[in-house]
Image (tube, rainbow, N blue to C red):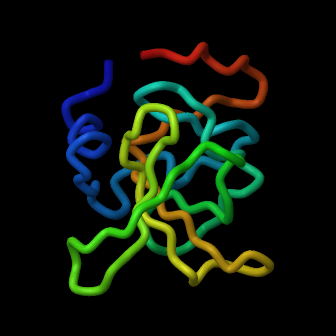
Amino acid sequence: MVSPAAFRVLFESETERAGSSPLNEEKRDGTFVCAACYLPLFESAHKYESGTGWPSFTQPIAGSMQTKRDFVMLIPRTEYHCARCGGHQGHVFNDGPPPLGKRWCNNGLALRFVPGSEPLPALRG
């Protein structure tokens, strides 16, 4: 079960307010999993401070995301979502740091952080 706010982000493609997620400041070693189904999406080693107010990563875990073009805004963007449950996570931009140059900009409400010292939760749903 996710909160009503997380549901709106994950399954109605809403965007949380910049700077509102405590995960933006999360710096411990661990794994970020989908808040809906617990699929591992990002390793903390690929998280960086983008200055945008949202948790940002240089790359996802291989096979964890699917993408599609998003035409909601004036300029087309690439939206990405959990490959397992389809939950909306955020958008990927071509302004990230080297060597990959990608910024996977995620809604914190769509994630759950699991510290490296803890086992990953069983997949759900």
Give the mark count.
0
The relative height of residue 100 versus residue 63 in the rendered view (above or below) is: below
In the rendered image, residue 106, in percent from the top left (x then y), is placed at 46, 56
The relative height of residue 68 versus residue 65 in the rendered view (above or below) is: below
Residue 80: quarter of image: bottom left
For residue 104, side relative to residue 7 (left or right): right
- Residue at 37 percent across and 61 percent down: it is 19
- Residue at 42 percent across and 32 percent down: it is 85
- Residue at 75 percent across and 41 percent down: it is 29
The relative height of residue 123 versus residue 112 in the rendered view (above or below) is: above
In the rendered image, residue 91, in percent from the top left (x then y), is placed at 43, 65
The quadrant the C terminus occupies is top left
- Residue at 57 percent across and 83 percent down: it is 95
In the rendered image, residue 81, in percent from the top left (x then y), is placed at 44, 49
Q: Nearer the viewer, residue 96 or 125?
A: 125
The quadrant the N terminus occupies is top left
For residue 20, side relative to residue 78 (left or right): left
In the rendered image, residue 31, in percent from the top left (x then y), is placed at 67, 37
